[in-house]
Image: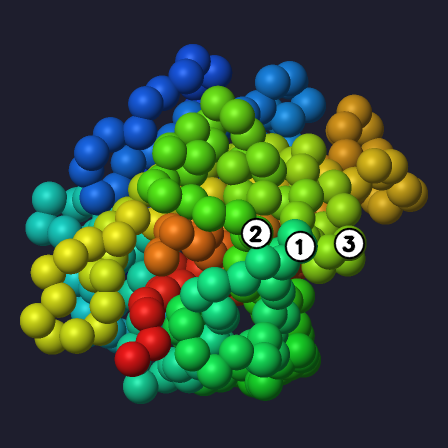
Amino acid sequence: MQRYQILVILASLSLVASFSALPRTKCRIGSRSSTEISSHISDSDSVNRRQFISNTVMTGFLSQIIAGQAQSALAEDDLTSQLFNDDGSLKEGIMNGMTTDKELENTLSVIFPSASEESQAIVSIDGKGTGSEAGIKVTYTVPDKWTAAPDYRDTMLTDRDKACDRITFYQVPGTFKDSNSLEKATTIGVAKALGFSSVAAGVLPKSLPGADTVTGRKVSKAASLKEEETEKRKYYEFDMAVAPDTCGTSAENLGLGFCPYDTIVLLSATIIDAKMMVCAVTCTKDEWKRSNAELKIVRNSFFVEKTI
């Protein structure tokens, strides 16, 4: 029981810290493989909405832990060892939403052209092909327990509720010689850096350009899946939360003084062959509450490489 209480306390502290309000001062992205990026939240309403997300995430995570309280002491020890290091800190994979059994995933891919004169972004929604047979290969994974796109229903839940709204990949028009535009995302804005305006209407949430950037980071992955590969490619990840224009009459809006977030978009962007490739995993607040760990796994699995 004592281990269980420690597990709950540490999980709570870690989750609250991961979604706490970031400082409003500008930060420079460091050279390490994973570096936090400053948030663009400029008013008290945004901070209140962020607290709403924090509470939602913590509630969902703790409910899963509490549901397993009746398991044997052996099972509890095993869960503790999976979640925490010997010093009590949350393991890196857990914080990044990367804990998963590869056998329980479906790996999917989409091919994009390596050269294009299009003035609008080339888009793939829920794994649909772009018409290209060679160029840039986008690979990603989805949980095996989810039904096929576009439903994405969690078969492990009694009501088979939806876990995700849509998974979108797009190629920003133009040529990008380096990652400078992504490096400056915190100063020029994520919407501009990731070319939201080039994406056809209806693909991304309408209010996404004005959404709050809850957190961001930079990670490095192999440039290809070849065993001898030593080159690394940088990926820039952003968690964005969208609030509706009007609050409506929902009970949860009464007395709050702001509109709580109703949509979450997990983004990842990288440069390959002078092309910017972007992944956007979109979900509602209810889907986020139920499936935030799996949604992060999908976004984190985003991988690009040249086709052979």
**Relative horizontal placement of residue 228, taking residue 138 as reference (left or right):** left
Circle 2 sits on which residue? Answer: 173
Question: Could you say which is closer to the camera, residue 133 or residue 300?
Answer: 133
x, y percent for residue 47:
59, 25
x, y percent for residue 27:
36, 20
Labels 2, 3: front one: 2
Residue lying at the far right of the rendered structure: 249
Q: Judging from the image, what secondary structure is the residue with disc 3 in?
A: loop
**Relative horizontal placement of residue 104, taking residue 172 as reference (left or right):** left
x, y percent for residue 138:
42, 70
Circle 3 sits on which residue? Answer: 201
Circle 1 sits on which residue? Answer: 120
Residue lying at the far front of the rendered structure: 117
Is any part of residue 55 visible from this angle?
no
**Image height check: is 173 above or below 188?**
below
Q: Earlier in the sequence, mark 2 or mark 3?
A: 2
Q: Earlier in the sequence, mark 3 or mark 1?
A: 1
Which label belongs to residue 195? Answer: none
x, y percent for residue 160:
64, 81
Q: CA gap, disc 3 to disc 1? A: 11 Å
